[in-house]
Amino acid sequence: MADKSEKKLRSKEDDEVSGRDGEAVSPELPVGIITDILVRLPVKTLLRFKCVSRPWRSLISDPSFASSFLARSLARQAVTSLVSISDLSQPGPSLCQFFRLDHQTGLCAPVPLPDMPSNTAEISEGIHGFICLDDGGLTCVCNPSTREVAALPLTNPDFPDDLQGEMSSFATLGYDSASKQYKVLKTWILYSPYGGVAAAHKVLTLGTNSWRTVDDCPIKFPWDDCISEEGAIHILTRDSMRGNIVGTLDLASEKFRMLLLPEGVRAVKVELKLFRGHLALLESRRLRDNNTITLYVLDDYRSRAWKELRMVLPRSWKEDIGFPPRSLRISIPRNGSGDILLIPTIIYKQSVAYLFSYNVESKRVKKVQIHGPPFHIFYQYRTLSLECRPFDLVDNILSLNHV
């Protein structure tokens, strides 16, 4: 009798856990508690859990759940970057391959994103973990976390018919926090054979099919860097007469304005970054000679007040790196702990690749060997060089279908 009672009890418990219709349920746990548990899990696990039952699929696919998940991702310390690797030595176009690089362990895992020709494709990191790929005619928005890719409607610049020349384009993604909409800015630069330069700009709101023309833009030169933050897209370019300039697109009004740069950086090579939530200009021309990196941080956006932050790396770092400092790309994770990453841009055959992490507070440099990318694939025929370009990577469960 005891055995039969135990079997009945177990059968009843199994029914409660698995459900009469075969679907997994948790009758004793409120939805809020289930959500609080699920929101702490990795994206890969959540994608598998969507197959558990229809209620779980609905819950994990809900945009409000994605918002809670993204908030936690943005609050966590950044430990990974998206790295694109392409072969620079081939005479023809080579394809970019993408990897997820862990800053702490140096491990790289492949990320299946579209293959893009490295000589024509422009890649921008976008915002909230989404990235934007542009290959002239084709523009895509990608979510590396879910491995989704969305091709945007085709569009062309509104240049006059009699204006001819060589043309290039780039696109970047931003987020309008007022309307809670993602918007893509696409820019075309046309070089006249007679020496003139023309530019055209269009904006598309994700989830729609119509591009809108943006007028009165000061940017008529190739872009050097682009940063998206809440409510704005900042583009660094170089005017042959005025030097470095930054044009800012306000995503709510879709109007451009100029950002006045600090004295002393208008004529030198700088990079556009985000440092602890603030727009910053990074200048590294003295890195090779005296180990110095200088950041000009926009401390107060309204008053346009810039603050200079100078960092001196230990002398030993160049001995550890083993190749010229100019072969590095400097990356600053958006929500990092004050670390500045130095990642090699050139990797030669049979060499060992390292990333270097400089902590602003402790002033120490950490050396981490990079493992995982199949460099040997590129080395089949000759000694080749590769370019590694790091992009900020934030986990985001939001489907591009719900943007």
Image: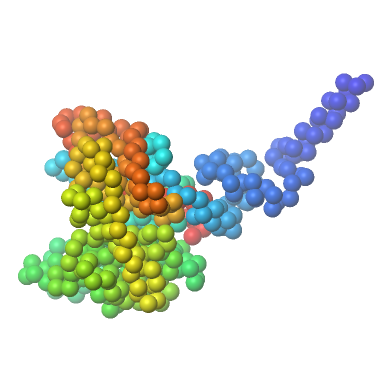
Residue 385 horizontal/vertical position (percent): 19, 39
Residue 396 left/right relative to 282: right
Residue drawn at the location 41% of the way across and 40% of the way down? 104
Residue 140 horizontal/vertical position (percent): 36, 55
Residue 10 left/right relative to 2: left
Q: Can residue 143 be seen by looking at this rendering?
A: no
Extreme-left residue of the structure = 194
Quarter of the figure that contains the N terminus: top right
Foreground residue among 274 and 193: 274
Q: In which quarter of the image is residue 27?
A: top right
Q: Can residue 194 be seen by looking at this rendering?
A: yes
Relative to 232, residue 12 above or below: above
Residue 326 horizontal/vertical position (percent): 19, 47
Residue drawn at the location 28% of the way across and 52% of the way down? 312
Q: Quadrant of residue 272?
A: bottom left
Residue drawn at the location 22% of the way across and 66% of the way down? 265
